[in-house]
Amino acid sequence: MKPEVARQRIETAIEQYGRLAANAIELVLNEVRSDLGAEAVNELIDEFDLELLYNITPMESDYSNS
């Protein structure tokens, strides 16, 4: 999924579901992580302030330090 599409889907979920949009947003973020990685997810979380509004926390890196 392209970042632009993810942004549009998150905006649509917020408009449609308001405070109840967390589940729809989580589905978008899972698809973004699968396609683009955790960094892209974290950028969207920051951009839309999802941690504060929906208690959606940033993801850890896709890479381990071990």
Image: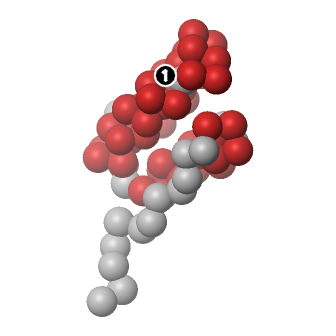
Q: Is residue 3 above or below residue 13?
A: below
Q: Residue at x 60, y 44 (%)?
A: 55
In this orientation, which residue lies closer to the viewer: 11 or 55?
Answer: 55
Quadrant of the rendering where the N terminus is positioned:
top left
| Relative horizontal placement of residue 41, taking residue 1 as reference (left or right) | right
Q: Residue at x 42, y 67 (%)?
A: 61
Q: Residue at x 34, y 73 (%)?
A: 63
Question: Toward which corner of the image does residue 19 lie, by quadrant?
Answer: top right
| Relative horizontal placement of residue 1, taking residue 21 as reference (left or right) | left
In this orientation, which residue lies closer to the viewer: 48 or 1?
Answer: 48
Q: Is residue 23 visible?
A: yes
**Residue flagged by tag 1: what amino acid is it?**
Arg
Q: Is residue 37 above or below residue 45?
A: below
Specify few, some or many for label 1: CA neighbours under 10 Å numbering under 14, 14-19, or 20 or more: some
Q: Which residue is mark 1?
A: 9
Looking at the picture, how far across and down is residue 34, in whole percent?
Answer: 29, 46
Q: Is residue 6 visible?
A: no
